[in-house]
Image (tube, grey):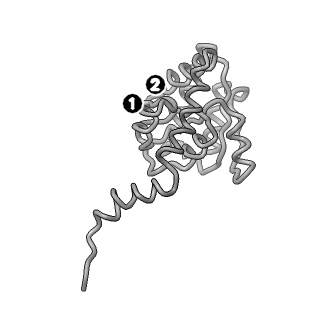
Amino acid sequence: EKYYKGLDLLFEALVLLKQKQINIRLNLIGDGPDMKFLQDFSNKNNLSHIVTFIGSKTGKDKYNLILQNDVFILTSRSEGLPTGVLEAASMAIPLIVTKSTNMADYIRSSSAGYVIKKLTAYNISNAIQTAYLDKKTGILAYKGKSARKMIKKSFLWPKIATLMDENIYSKVKVCKK
């Protein structure tokens, strides 16, 4: 969904990067009600050589596709606990996320990627450009390793269960009849 997932702004950011002649590619995994809009936007803005619409993938197919990328980008306007981010981080893929993904503090403290504080096309393009430049210096690879460490430190199932218990279940009042 273009609005909820922030794809409208991500695609505008691609236009900005194209204007700067930053040589990137976007592999868009998934589908949804706004796929045609995004394909039309891509065609109208001459992004077809930059964007590949892969469609919905699961299991090993999805993991193999994620592994082919330098970064994992999630530009959502709202998320709970984004599984895609956790999956990519577990594969040592550095992350570019919005503050609204609820992953910002983890990513910052772990040096696991880049956090977009205010969701705008300009800020998204800057984060992608920074990652592009960091790839040349080895910083991006370091961020990928840090993403994997972040998963091991904060997101293994026993840790998640403890966090859920402390932050959700222990605060719920049970009604007795």
Q: Residues within 10 Å of mark 2 (few under 14, many from 20)?
A: some
- Horizontally, residue 79 falls left or right of residue 138, namely left
Which quadrant would residue 165 be assigned to in this image?
bottom left
- Tell me the SS state at disc 1: loop
Q: Position of residue 85 (x, y in %)?
A: 55, 43
Which x, y percent locates residue 61? 75, 48
Q: Which mark is residue 118?
A: 1
Splitting the image into 4 quarters, where does residue 99 fall?
top left
Kindly indicate whether the residue at mark 2 contacts the one at mark 1 (C-beta within 8 angstroms).
yes
User: Tag 2's secondary structure?
Assistant: helix
Residue type beneath disc 2? Asn
Front residue of this view, candidates 57 and 69: 69
Q: Where's the C terminus, which quadrant?
A: bottom left
Dot placed on the residue nearer the N-terminal end, 1 or 2 = 1
**Relative height, residue 102 to residue 25 (above, below):** below
Image location of residue 25, percent across then percent down: 68, 27
Q: Amino acid at mark 1?
A: Lys
Residue at x 55%, y 24% (from the top left corner): 128
Task: Tell me if mark 1 has few (under 14), some (14-19) or many (20+) residues whose alpha carbon lies within 10 angstroms of its own.
Answer: few
Query: Label 1, label 2: how many angstroms apart (C-alpha)?
Result: 7 Å
Residue at 34%, 64% (x, y): give it: 169
Q: Residue at x 50, y 21 (%)?
A: 126
Q: Which mark is residue 31?
A: none
Say how many tags the image has.
2
Residue named by callout 2: 123
Q: Is the residue 17 above or below the residue 147 in the image?
A: above
Residue 107 position, x and y percent, is: 46, 35
Q: Nearer the viewer, residue 144 or 44?
A: 144
Left-right relation of 80 to 168? right
From the viewer's side, name the closer residue of 76 and 48.
Answer: 76
Asked if residue 12 is positioned above or below residue 63 in the image, the reply reads: above
